[in-house]
Amino acid sequence: MYKFVNVNRVHLAGEVRTTALCDINLNIEAGEYVAITGPSGCGKSTLLNLLGLIDKPSSGQCWFEGQPAHDLGENELGKLRNGRIGFIFQSFNLIEELTVFENVELALEYGDVPPSERARRVTAMLERLGVAHRAKHFPSQLSGGQQQRVAIARALVGEPAVLLADEPTGNLDSAHGSEVMQMLREINAQGTAIVMVTHSPEHAQQASRVLQLRDGRLVGADASAAANQQRALAVEQAAEAR
């Protein structure tokens, strides 16, 4: 699903260069459940933005479902992202002026989904997430747990191949946080890949694989695997050159 080769991301502010990610090599397969951990400022959100095709690398290659995302323009990235990648945010990012139904339906209005099909899919997703009885309410009328359920419904209604979650339990109490983690496990069990940024070791261990970032670099077992992958790629390229 994802393949990153020698990916670097450098932020420029005037004459100041800040390296957010350095020499990232990784593969994420379809249907995986991956957690990204590390201290604040280590590059977790930057990596998630690259995975979400919101940002592009300063150098290196990013592939998504066989497409070279590093070579695509903004319009092409938007088309590749639309319907294939869902996002869940810590702050929910619901639009206060829209009802629950309208917030979820918004995710389908950028595609070619007819209104009747949009209504069917939104209703089915709200029922699946247990908030159909709140369809006509506004976000301010919901609890934090209900708002996150609506945010998950919005992310899933387009039937994405991968769900990117940025601290999905960060604004929830422990009980509602546990409910969200249970939902993520169920969503993954049904075939949707999940990549989750989290500060919680307990939540990270619920994933099938944990990526640890330190100072913009992968560390631990995944760093060793990435190094082996890079060496194998270099050998392959050398053989092709001969």
Image (spheres, rainbow, N blue to C red):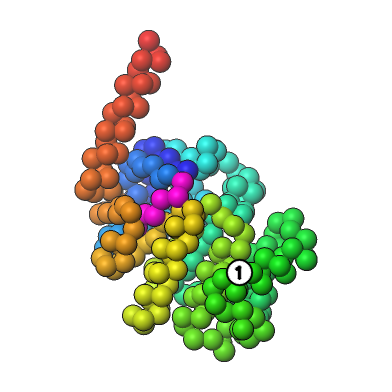
Figure quadrant of the C terminus: top left
| 60 or 114: nearer the viewer | 114
Is any part of residue 12 visible from this angle?
no
**Magenta region:** 30-35
Give the residue drawn at x 23%, y 48%.
219
Q: Is residue 219 depicted above or below 178 in this figure?
A: above
Please, is residue 187 above or below residue 21 in the view?
below
**Residue 15: x and y, percent?**
38, 52
Kindly give the residue lying farthest to the top in the view shown. 242
Query: Which residue is pictured at 66% across the width and 76% down the height?
Result: 101
The spot of residue 52 in percent (x, y) is 50, 54
Query: Quarter-wise, where is residue 73 in the image?
Result: top right
User: Residue 83, how many percent across, how many down?
Assistant: 61, 54
User: Which three-letter amino acid code belongs to the residue tagged 1?
Assistant: Met
Q: Is residue 101 visible?
A: yes
Secondary element at image label 1:
helix
Residue that carries the numbered disc 1 in the rendered image? 125
